[in-house]
Structures are given as C-alpha cells and as structure tokens.
C-alpha cells in the first residue's frame, strides 16, 4: 500500500482477505472510501483508520469474532461514523452463534477515561513544572504525552499502575518562552479507542527587544522596532536619556501579534533637533529591557552654504526656535541661536531683517515650497519690501540675480516622497551616474503645470541628443531650498536615472550648476492622463467663437484598453525592479503623441491635485482613494498595493477621469474601503474589465491579480474586437 500515497478509494471485496496489519494505511493519508465487504476478516483494529478522515468504511459480509477487539465498530455504528450505521454487520460469539453486531454485549470493554492535573499551566521562564495525566478504564489504557515539538527539556516519568489507573507525570525543566501557548496533550488508548486531554502552557517572561532599526523614511521617518514579552510589555522612549513625550511630531504606532509588538516611532518632519540617541524601554511585571539607536535626520541648517542670506526656518519642533544668520563666504560666519519664546523670536527677526537688508542687501537664489514670502531687496531703502511673490520659479526668476533675500517664516509643508524605497531596501544607488545638463543649454518657453516640487515648464534643450541640435523637453524646477530637499532632489534624479522603460517617462538629467535645481524630462505633449481623460469624456466642452460646445473625440473602448495596458506594462517593469510606487493614479501618468502613455511622476504632483490626498498627522498626505485597506490601516505598501491602485486607475479610465468615490468625504472613503466596499462598475466598462478591477481589489494582498497577468489580459482584450466584450454585462 505504501506505493499508493495519493490513493482515495480502496476496494478489496470478496477476496478472502483475512487480516490487515495495524499500520497498513500509514502511507495513504488521502483514503476516504474503503470497501472491505465480502471478505474473511474476523477482527480489525481501529488504529488502522486512526489518521484517516473516512467518509465511508464498508465491512458487510465479514464474520467477525464477538470480542472487545471489535467493540469500536459497534461504537462507530452507534455514532454513525463512516456510514457504518447503515450496514448489517454480524459476529460469532463463544457459542458459535451468529448475532447482529449491535447485540454484542462485552463487559469490561470501554473507551479509556482520562484526566489531567491542570486545565492551564502557568510557569515563569526558567522554572520547572510537573503535570500528571491519569488514564483509567478497562482494558487498562496506555497513556502518553505528545510533546515532541516542546522546546523545554521534558522528562517522562511513569508512575504506579494502580488497578484500572495508569498515571504518567510530565516534568518540564527550565521552561522557555518559545513554549508559550503550547498545548500539552495526553493520550490514553486501548483496543476500544482513544481519549485525550490538553493543558495550555502559559510562560511568563520578561520583555526582549527583537529589532530596533535606524530611522528610515517611508511616508514619515520611522524607527522600526519589534518587542516581545508576556504579559505584553508597556513601551516608552528616551531621547538622549530624557523621557520622550509623544507629540504631533513624534509618536509611536504599533500593533500586537501574539506576544510580539511591532511598530514605529514616527517622526513628522524631523529636524537636527531630533538627532540623537533613541532608547526604547519595554517593561512588564517580570522585568525591563532597553536598546538604543542613533537617529540622524538633518545636519544643522546650511552649514556649508556659500550664499549670503537670512533664513528663519521651520523649527517649531525644537524647544528653541533657532535663528541662523550667514554672511558672505569671505566673511566670518556668525549665527545667533536664542532659546526664547515667540515674542523674542519676532523681535530678533525684525532686527536681523533690518540689518541684513540695509547692510548686506544680498539675495538667495532659491524659492521655497508653500506659503513662503520672497522679498526682493532693491536699493530702495525706504521701501525694501516692494515685491512679494509666492515661489520664485517663474521663467524670469530662474535667472534671479544674487540680490534676493528669502525669508521663510511659515511652516514649509514637506510632503514626503515615498518613491525612494524599494520593498525592503533603499533604491538609492551611490554609484548612479546622473547626467548633468548645462543651464545655458535650456531655454524656457512656457509653463506646463505645477507640482509640489515646483513648476513644470516646456523648454528647448540644446546639445541633448547627437542627432538633434535642440529638442523640446519638460523641466521641473526645485523651489524648496532646504538641505533635505536638495538631497531628495539628488536621490530622485538617481532613482529616475535607474528607471528606464518604454512606459516610464524618460529622464534626461539635471541642471545643478546654480539655482534653482532643474530636472529635465521628455516632453509628453498631451500632459497628464487625468486631464486628458476628462478632455476626452462625454462632459468635455470646448470654446468655439467664445461659446462652450460639446467636444468631439470621446475615447473608445479599444483606446481605453490601450491606455490601461501601457500603464500595466510600465508597472510590470517597476515590479521587476522591486520598486513600489505607492502613488499610482492617472494624474501621475503622462500622454504623448499617438496615445502613448507613460508613468510620469514619482510623487511630485500633490499640490495641484491636493483634493486627491488626505492629510494625516500634520503634513503627510496620503492618496487614500487609491489605497487598499492594509495601506490605509498599517501604511503597508507593496507591489500588491500598487496592483490595487491599478484597479482604481482602470476605474478612472473607464469613467473618463472621475475622482474615485467622488460623492464621499475622505473619512467616509476610509470607512468604505476598510469595510470592504469597492467602486461600482462604470457605465461603459465591459464585464471582463470590471473583473480585472475586482481582481485588483481582493482584500487579501496575495489573492490579488498579479500585474503580469493583468497586462496579459488587457493586451489580449485590446486585440479582441470590441464586439466580443460584454459591455452590457
Ligand atoms: P508634476 O510636478 O510632475 O505633477 O507635474 C505637474 C504638471 O505638469 C502635470 O500635471 C502635467 O500637466 C505637467 N507635466 C509634468 N511633466 C510633464 C512632461 N514630461 N510633459 C508634459 N507635461 C508635463
């Protein structure tokens, strides 16, 4: 029998079979139907079928010996197991009389009884414990503990065999925390059958820190930790040895899985004031554990700056609002940092402003993100503040001279760009060579749009390609001058240099000689896909002779499929690079000539489409309408969460660019998604395509369609003539 490991049905009928060895079916775990009728079996052991989940066992037309050995068949018949209740079974008694099995009456032949000394056993780590199991009945059962996987060294110790009681002690020695939650099971068995009893082992142990990692920037900076202990430890943090109080800027989030607590100490826009040693302290009744890690977020602001400017930054997280005043490089640098409240801060600001404008009158070349005042300090000392602008990256100001004073007094909304992180590791490659383009080779033509990093312009770029002496490009100018933003810019450029695919927007390089910093991209003449979809939908209007008219050129089904499969193709590539985008949406795709579509933005479009994002905890913006439940609840972003977003992209395409859940507020959307509701099928969407959406919106990430499969399906649907697609459902 051991050759037939997959066997499900076994029939040995009318064959004169007399005996079956006790372990005959040990290698046939899939047996469900066994027919042994019409044989010469006189006895049979229940242990043969012990590990099987039998639906049917046929035993008719065997003449068993009436004995305790077949009492189990009688019991199974009574309980209706394995369909035995419908069978007419007989046995021959000592007088050679054949009687129905149900009438067999054998004394001292019953299932074993079992009892254990504890229902639950609670032990501290390192202690010893003894538990006893008693098996009784007749025939007297064998008793044993099944503790093969137990880590704590255990010894079996058989006790006395009293009449009708067989007791066995189990001694646990030096109990370990690994055995917490273990079910210690005792078994008593005789020829009639088996009984068992279990004891739940709870091991109390002091906290231990399993992991503590240096801060990593996901959506916020996170010091990731994992801690365990039983009872669950309480957690708190020290910063440079001082108790750290949670604020809007620093807070802890964790969830508990069994005995393990995993989570993050999260930092929203940390500055150099947050640098230092972070110690996690975990405490329970049995003790305490701690571990320290270094958190380094930012250098002191602009230590290496060569420009003359006054910068009063966004340091509300620090106990002391700092003021840094920097002179021309050839002069000594001086800085004033005063630990005073807001009133003093304002006074110093005015004094410094007055001195700087009158005495040095120099300009910084950078713009700042957010509500930042840019003040041109011309020689008119009576009215030094005569030009105020929001952001300086207009074509003319790209060449802003050295005489600009930039004073940023308000919070700069730093919107984290999540794109730098691959699953598990950072995408930043130190050896990436980013192409540098000369500033004089770029001639700006007009503004194309605006993102969180700055404005986007159409430009002509000279000497970019060996075949064309000039070509049209899109340039993005960095308007945030902080050191962190410069680093982000550099990393973004390295990331984009490394991502090369026909459906990822082409990145040509950076222009880093002077300010502002510029990124140069291929120009996609129809702009972002969301605008494009709206302009080609049923509601699109155009002005003809100043009058609004219905626009013609609604997108057809095959065009929609073509758009979708190109994005899927770009995503297949991103997934192959283990790159998690986190912000896939039509607003982040671009459309070129001949309906060429590319994934064109890696987290920079949040200003214009700010209603598509939901602000959580200060300045973190999340595109919740495109996010699966696990990203909303745990900030877990994976290739599978990108697939969810792709489902939403499909929905956007087939609704001509509608905002997902447009009828609901952000909090209602969160409720809807976490409760498992999904977007409805758009009116013009074929069933086949909606099935893909539903495949992307499976709650369990592993059950979602794979992006490769999605691409194949879309590609095939795109090729099929539209009549095959079930538009009416
Ligand atoms: P972003 O900062 O990437 O979100 O860009 C803001 C806007 O500029 C987009 O919504 C597009 O309309 C436009 N844009 C960005 N990149 C390009 C490009 N490569 N070609 C044409 N338009 C672009």
Image (cartoon, rainbow, N blue to C red):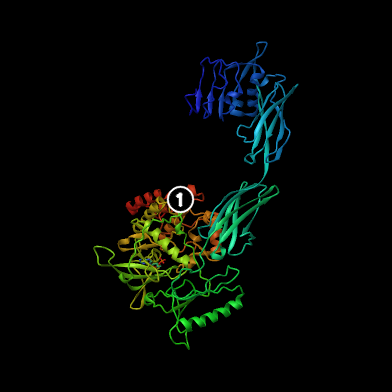
- Residue 199: tell me if it is visible: yes
- Residue furthest out toward the left: 467
Left/right placement of residue 30 relative to residue 516 reads: right
**Callout 1 environment at 10 Å: few (<14), some (14 to 19), or many (20+)?**
some
Judged from the image, the quadrant occupied by ligand 1 is bottom left
Residue 343 at what x, y percent from top left? Answer: 61, 78
Query: Quarter of the image holding residue 674?
Result: bottom right
Query: Based on the displayed image, in which of its 4 quarters is residue 147 positioned?
Result: top right
Image height check: is 460 above or below 193? below
Residue drawn at (65%, 11%) of the image: 96
Q: Nearer the viewer, residue 693 or 205?
A: 205
Taking the spot 66% from the left edge, 17% from the top edge, the residue there is 67
Report helix, strand or loop for mark 1.
helix
Q: Position of residue 603 (x, y in %)?
A: 44, 62
* Residue positioned most to the bottom: 382
The extreme top residue here reads: 95
Res 307 quadrant in image:
bottom left
Task: Judge by depth and name the residue closer to the eye, 48 or 661.
Answer: 48
List x then y, in percent, for residue 558.
34, 57
Q: Of 718 and 519, which appears nearest the observer?
A: 519
- Foreground residue, 263 or 93? 263
**Residue 165 in view in this figure:** no
Give the total of numbered labels. 1
When the figure is inspected, residue 455 is found, relative to residue 504, above or below; the finding is below
Q: Is mark 1 within 8 Å of ligand 1?
A: no
Residue 212: % across, % down: 57, 52
Which residue is label 1 attached to?
695
Residue 645, placed above or below residue 304: above
């Amino acid at each position: 029998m051991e050759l037939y490991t997959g066997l499900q049905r076994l029939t040995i009928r009318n064959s004169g079979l007399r005996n079956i060895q006790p372990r005959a079916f040990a290698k046939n775990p899939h047996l469900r139907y066994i027919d042994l009728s019409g044989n010469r079996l006189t006895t049979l052991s229940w242990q043969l079928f012990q590990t099987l989940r039998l639906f049917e066992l046929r035993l008719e037309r065997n003449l068993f010996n009436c004995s305790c050995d077949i009492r189990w068949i009688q019991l199974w018949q009574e309980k209706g197991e394995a369909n035995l209740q419908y069978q007419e079974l007989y046995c021959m008694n000592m007088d050679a009389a054949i009687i129905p099995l149900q009438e067999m009456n054998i004394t001292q032949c019953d299932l074993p009884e079992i009892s254990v000394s504890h229902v639950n056993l609670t032990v501290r780590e390192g202690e010893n414990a003894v538990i006893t199991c008693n098996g009784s009945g007749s025939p007297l059962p064998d008793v044993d503990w099944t503790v093969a996987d137990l880590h704590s060294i255990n010894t079996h110790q058989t006790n006395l065999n009293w009449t009708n009681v067989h007791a066995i002690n189990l001694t646990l020695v030096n109990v370990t925390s690994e055995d917490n939650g273990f079910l210690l099971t005792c078994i008593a068995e005789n020829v009639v059958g088996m009984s068992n009893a279990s004891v739940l082992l709870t091991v109390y142990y002091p906290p231990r820190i399993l992991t503590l990692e240096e801060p990593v920037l996901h959506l916020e900076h996170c010091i990731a930790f994992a801690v365990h202990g039983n009872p669950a430890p309480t957690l708190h943090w020290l910063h440079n040895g001082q108790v750290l109080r949670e604020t809007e800027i620093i807070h802890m989030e964790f969830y508990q899985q069994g005995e393990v607590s995993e989570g993050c100490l999260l930092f929203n826009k940390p500055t150099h004031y947050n640098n230092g040693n972070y110690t996690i302290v975990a405490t329970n009744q049995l003790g305490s554990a701690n571990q320290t890690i270094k958190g380094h977020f930012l250098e002191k602001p602009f230590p290496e700056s060569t420009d003359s400017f006054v910068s009063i930054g966004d340091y509300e997280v620090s106990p002391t609002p700092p003021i840094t005043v920097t002179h021309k490089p050839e002069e000594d640098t001086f800085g004033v940092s005063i630990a005073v409240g807001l009133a003093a801060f304002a006074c110093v600001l005015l004094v410094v402003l007055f001195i700087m404008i009158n005495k040095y009158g120099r300009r910084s070349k950078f713009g700042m993100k957010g509500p930042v005042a840019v003040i041109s300090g011309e020689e008119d000392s009576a009215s030094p503040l005569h030009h105020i602008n929001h952001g300086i990256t207009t074509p003319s100001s790209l060449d802003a001279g050295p005489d600009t004073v930039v004073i940023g007094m308000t919070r700069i909304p730093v919107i984290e760009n999540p794109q730098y992180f691959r699953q598990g590791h950072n995408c930043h490659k130190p050896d990436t060579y980013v192409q540098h383009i000369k500033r004089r080779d770029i001639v700006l033509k007009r503004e194309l749009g605006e993102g969180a990093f700055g404005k986007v312009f159409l430009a002509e770029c000279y000497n970019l390609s060996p075949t064309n002496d000039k070509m049209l490009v899109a340039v993005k100018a960095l308007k945030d001058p902080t050191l962190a933003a410069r680093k982000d810019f550099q990393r973004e450029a390295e990331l984009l240099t490394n991502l090369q695919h026909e459906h990822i927007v082409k990145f040509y390089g950076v222009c880093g000689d002077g300010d502002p910093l510029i990124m140069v991209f291929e120009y996609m003449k129809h702009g972002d896909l969301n605008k494009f979809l709206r302009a080609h939908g049923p509601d699109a209007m155009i002005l003809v002779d100043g009058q609004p008219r219905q626009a013609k050129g609604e997108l057809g089904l095959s065009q929609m499929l073509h758009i979708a499969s190109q994005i899927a193709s770009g995503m297949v590539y991103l997934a192959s690079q283990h790159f998690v985008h986190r912000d896939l949406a039509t607003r982040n795709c671009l459309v070129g000539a001949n309906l060429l579509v590319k994934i064109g933005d890696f987290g920079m479009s949040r200003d214009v489409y700010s209603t598509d994002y939901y602000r959580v905890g200060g300045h973190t913006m999340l595109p919740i309408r495109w996010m699966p439940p696990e990203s909303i609840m745990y900030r877990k972003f994976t290739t599978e969460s990108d697939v969810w977003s792709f489902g939403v992209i499909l929905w956007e395409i087939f609704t001509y660019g509608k905002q997902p859940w447009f009828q609901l507020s952000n909090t209602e959307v969160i409720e809807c998604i976490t409760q498992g509701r999904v977007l409805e099928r758009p009116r013009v969407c074929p069933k086949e395509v909606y099935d893909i959406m539903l495949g992307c919106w499976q709650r369990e990430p592993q059950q979602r369609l794979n992006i490769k499969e999605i691409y194949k399906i879309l590609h095939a649907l795109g090729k099929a003539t539209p009549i095959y697609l079930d538009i009416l459902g």
